[in-house]
Structure formats: C-alpha cells, structure tokens
Image: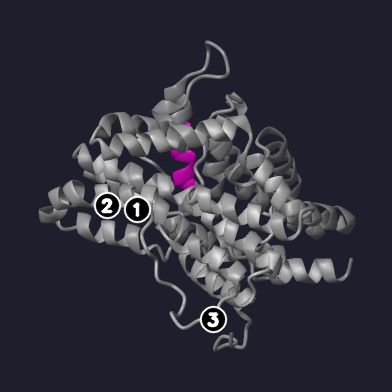
C-alpha cells in the first residue's frame, strides 16, 4: 500500500481516523491493510476494535480468535476475548439480539424498551443508536430518533447509514418509507450479512486473508469509544482545543428527558431523587457546553455528591473532572479522574481519564506518575488513538 498524500503511513492514518471518531474510514483502511498483511496480529486486533465499537460483535470475536490462532499467547486478544465471553456481557449480547428479533417482527415498542436499557448499560456501540433510532421512528417519535442518530454519528462521523437516516428524517414525506422498508433491511443484514465492498476486487490474498474477507460482510459502521484529539504538548493548549471540540463533536450528547434518564434506577437509597439528579445534570452539562465552567462545576458537583452510581452520575463525574482540568484546577481534576477510574473502571471514558490524568500529572511535575498512567492506558486500551498525540509521544520518549 502507498503512503497517504501527507506522507503518513496507512497505519498512522487509521489511528488518526479512530482518534477523529471516524470508525468507518478506519475500518476501510485496516481491511485493505489486512489484505496485504493477513498475519499481522496488530492489524487484526485493531480491526476487532473497530468491529466491536461498531456493534459487529461476532466479527470482533472472530478477529480475536484469528489472532489467537496465529499467536496463541497474544495478551491483548486474550484479554478482550475474555471480557467478551463474561456472563454479564453475553447476557447483554443475548438481549441485544432479541431486540433485533423484535424489530424484525415489528414489535417496535418492546425493542425500544430493550435498546434503551442496553444503551444505559453500554453506551459505546454505534449499532445500538442505529436501531434505537429506527424504533423511535416506528413509534412516530421523530425528534427522539434524530437525537439518537446524531449521538451515534458523533461516535462515527463517517457513518453513511446514520447520515442517510438524518437526511431522510429532514424530509417528512419519507418517514413512512424509512420505517416500513429500511429497518427490515438493516436487521436482515445484521443477521445474514450483506456485502460491503471495500477492497479492490483484483487484490491478491493469501488463504488466511480469505478468512478475514468474510468479516467484510454485513458491516454497518459507527470511541467508539470516546476519543478526543489532543495535538498540543501543553495542558493549556490541549484545553483550548478541547473546548472547541466539545461544543461541536458533543453537541448531541444531551439526551432528551425521555431517553435513558428515566431508565436510571436509584442505587443510593430511598432519598435518591431521579428528577433532581436529572435537572442538575442537564443544567451542568449545558453550562459546560456553553463554556460557563463555574456554573458547570456547581451543578455537576451536586450530581456527583449524590453518588448514585447511575449513568448520569458517571457522566457528571467525568465532565466535572474535565471542567476542573479546563480551568487548570489540577488538584481537583486529579481527584475526580481518580474517582472516575475507581468507581467506573472499564466504562466509556476510561482511556480518556487515564490520558488526561497523565496530562495533569505532567503539568504538576509528577513525571513518573504521568508515565505510569499512560502505560496503563496503553495496556487497557491499546490503539485508542491517544498514542499518536504529540503529548503522549513526547512524554513516553523521555521516560
């Protein structure tokens, strides 16, 4: 494969696409690379990550199994396949597939309820946003469909399926067509597989590569994971960049009152007030988006102090840490990032929290701690995109 126009390698370009929340573009690049290097386990692991966050779980599992066939002791594939096979996640997968079955049977209300619960438990998978939006459309809740699809598109900005849905929803005359035809086609593709032509037909592949070609079928792409784009080496430069990115890329993160929030049950006792938590979170997050960081800190702090362990509590804790970080209140930012990592390990902002904790440690002269958390980030979330940032490369080069 040739290098890109800017001289970067395809591998670097793929990582940049992941960092830019463009999983669809990254997937296309990685599939072509795998065609040339079918035994490259780093590529296959990265391919698995893309499939996983796009919601193509069977294909992600097949990739990890292929890595272990090639290198049986590959720790990354063993760890991720192990987490995939845990009873709790397998239960989640089973409920997800049952929701797709309900859509196929036109039982949209049941599917909608299931998908909302699933999204509350794992909010990093694009396909959940795709099908939840279709259910909202089927129930004539068009604004809800738009909100959900916009949130999904923020996780995969190049997702043509979600972009097409949003374009169609703008035309009120197409709403009925979208529901009667599209959702059946999409569910059928998820179940049976539909060709996704990415690689050149004339590409010569080895026998092992032919196995990986099977993974191309049925792909309907959309962190991931929540990945941001830190290009500067100094905390204040990163912070300025993040304020701009947060207002644009996260514009769809506030879900309406009828999405997710009602699904949160009290885990803080009889005094827990769902409406109070929701109100303070909405006020705090809106203030955060508008750059009113003092108001954001005040409102998000109330939600964090409730300590309910809910979806909103988790979101509030992460954005409270970021609010402190953006104000250069590094001691408080450190405290809240550490609290997030302790209370919500392995969730949506785990790698983000580790990265920015590293930035905080570096800014406060704690270089060894910065290296430790960045190494931990590499271990728990390899290929997350932050490794290509200038800050990461500068710190790790001098370790």
| 223 or 291: nearer the viewer | 223
Q: In which quadrant is the N terminus drawn?
A: bottom right
* Image coords of residue 359 (percent x, y): 74, 58
At a point 35% along the width and 30% down the height, the residue shown is: 113
Question: For the residue labelled by badge 1, is the local secondary structure a helix, a strand or a loop?
Answer: helix
Q: Main secondary structure of the magenta part?
A: helix
Q: Position of residue 222 (x, y in %)?
A: 44, 57
Mark 3 lies on residue: 204
Q: Residue 209, how many percent across, how many down?
A: 58, 69
Question: Could you say which disc has been placed on residue 185 in the image?
Answer: 2
The magenta region covers: 280-287
Farthest residue, direction front: 207
Q: Quadrant of residue 165?
A: bottom left
Q: Secondary structure at mark 2?
A: helix
**Magenta stretch holds residue 284:** yes
Front-most of 324 and 261? Answer: 261
Q: Name the residue carrying label 1.
A: 189
Is 393 contained in the magenta span? no
Say what secondary structure mark 3 lies in: loop
Residue at 55 percent across and 63 percent down: it is 211
Neighbour class for label 3 at 10 Å: few (<14), some, many (≥20)?
Answer: few
């Amino acid at each position: 494969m040739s290098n890109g126009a800017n001289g970067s390698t395809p591998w670097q370009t793929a990582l940049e696409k992941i960092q830019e929340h463009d999983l669809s573009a990254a997937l296309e690049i990685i599939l072509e690379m795998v065609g040339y290097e079918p035994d490259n386990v780093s590529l296959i692991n990265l391919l698995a990550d893309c499939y996983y966050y796009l919601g193509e779980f069977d294909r992600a599992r097949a990739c990890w199994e292929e890595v272990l066939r090639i290198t049986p002791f590959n720790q990354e594939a063993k760890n991720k396949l192990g987490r995939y096979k845990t009873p709790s996640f397998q239960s989640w997968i089973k409920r997800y597939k049952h929701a797709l079955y309900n859509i196929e049977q036109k039982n949209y209300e049941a599917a909608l309820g299931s998908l909302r619960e699933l999204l509350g438990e794992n909010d990093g998978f694009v396909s959940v946003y795709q099908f939840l939006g279709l259910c909202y459309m089927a129930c004539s809740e068009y604004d809800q469909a738009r909100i959900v699809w916009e949130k999904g598109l923020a996780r995969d900005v190049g997702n043509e399926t979600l972009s097409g849905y949003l374009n169609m929803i703008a035309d009120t005359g197409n709403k009925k067509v979208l529901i009667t035809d599209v959702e059946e086609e999409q569910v059928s593709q998820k179940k049976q597989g539909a060709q996704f032509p990415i690689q050149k037909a004339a590409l010569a592949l080895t026998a092992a590569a032919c196995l990986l070609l099977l993974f191309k079928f049925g792909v309907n792409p959309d962190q991931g994971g929540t990945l941001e784009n830190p290009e500067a080496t100094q905390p204040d430069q990163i912070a300025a960049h993040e304020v701009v990115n947060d207002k644009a890329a996260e514009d769809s993160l506030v879900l309406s009152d009828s999405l997710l929030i009602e699904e949160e049950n009290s885990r803080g006792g009889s005094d827990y007030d769902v409406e109070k938590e929701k109100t303070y979170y909405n006020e705090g997050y809106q203030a955060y988006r508008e750059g009113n960081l003092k108001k954001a800190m005040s409102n998000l702090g109330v939600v964090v102090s409730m300590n309910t362990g809910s979806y909103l509590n988790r979101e509030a804790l992460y954005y409270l840490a970021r609010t402190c970080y953006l104000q250069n209140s590094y001691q408080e930012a450190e405290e809240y990032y550490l609290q997030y990592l302790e209370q919500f390990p392995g969730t949506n902002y785990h790698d983000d929290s580790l990265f920015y904790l590293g930035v905080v440690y570096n800014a406060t002269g704690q270089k060894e701690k910065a290296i430790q958390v960045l190494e931990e980030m590499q271990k728990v979330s390899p290929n997350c995109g932050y490794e290509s940032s200038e800050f990461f490369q500068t710190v790790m080069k001098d370790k």
